[in-house]
Image (tube, rainbow, N blue to C red):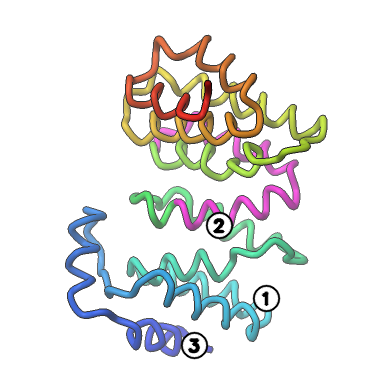
Amino acid sequence: MTLDDALSALRANIEPGRAEGSAAYHKVAREYLGVPNPAINDLTKAWRQTLDLQTRVSLASELWDTNIHEARIAAAKLLTQARIRPDQDVWALIKAWVPQFDAWAIADHACSAGAKRLVADPSRLDEIEAWTVSDHMWTRRAALVITLPWTKQNFPSEQDLEIRDRVLEWAGGYVQDKDWFIQKAVAWWVRDLSKHDPARSRAFLELHSAKMKTFAVKEAGKHLP
């Protein structure tokens, strides 16, 4: 599978008129093909099943470097898999993408791939912590988005609870940042956590809500009684 093969497969799924809408919606200057996500899902699922790991990593890198919206999403989806061994090259590639984040959809798909690698090796959180003080807003935001799996466990281990507290401490350091995307990310983390650990979410809001934007407080407490 070459890059040209992959791009041809993506272009075969273009929906007329969709590219213009995507460009207007995402508001970032790059090429948009107009390929719907379900089609990208189907293509990348097939590629994951048929390509060896080294080829997948190489293809993902090449797709990302095109700077085409759908190609970058395909690159992330190509690496979104729970079990990858060895995964050092995958993790290194995803980290290399983070400083290039400039739009939420691409960033979120890449973070979804990265989250699988964090769950596989939580020691990588030490690397993520450095993101929280980055000058690049999208990198700071990624520290919360990539750690979302720790909001979802119904039966967390002691280590999981320690990670929850660690990420909540990061989030607490973000609350005075008035950037909409940062406030939204804090709210997202606390809201999702509230479904499984309402006590921690409630304690976070009691401590920090006065410094958060109103919409973020409302979103974070959406599922709290």
Count of all numbered marks drawn on residues in the image: 3
In the picture, residue 46 is in which quadrant?
bottom right
Q: Which residue is mark 2?
A: 94
Relative to 172, 219 lies left or right: left
The residue at the point 57 percent across, 22 percent down is 201
Residue 35, position as x, y percentages in the image: 33, 75
In the picture, residue 17 is in which quadrant?
bottom left
Relative to 132, 153 lies left or right: right
| Label 1 environment density (alpha carbons within 10 Å; few <14, some 14–19, many ≥20) | some
Amino acid type, mark 1: Leu
- Helix, strand or loop status at disc 3: loop
Q: Earlier in the sequence, mark 3 or mark 2?
A: 3
Amino acid type, mark 3: Thr
Cα separation, mark 3 vs mark 2, equals 20 Å
Cα separation, mark 2 vs mark 1, equals 14 Å
Q: Which residue is mark 1?
A: 53
Mark number, residue 191? none
| Label 2 environment density (alpha carbons within 10 Å; few <14, some 14–19, many ≥20) | many
- Helix, strand or loop status at disc 1: helix
Q: Is residue 111 magenta?
A: yes
Report the span colored magenta.
108-136
Residue 165, position as x, y percentages in the image: 67, 24
154 and 84: which is toward the camera:
154
Q: Which residue is mark 3?
A: 2
102 and 152: which is toward the camera:
152
Residue 129, position as x, y percentages in the image: 60, 33
Cα separation, mark 3 vs mark 1, equals 14 Å
The residue at the point 34 percent across, 66 percent down is 69
Q: Is residue 32 magenta?
A: no
Amino acid type, mark 2: Ile
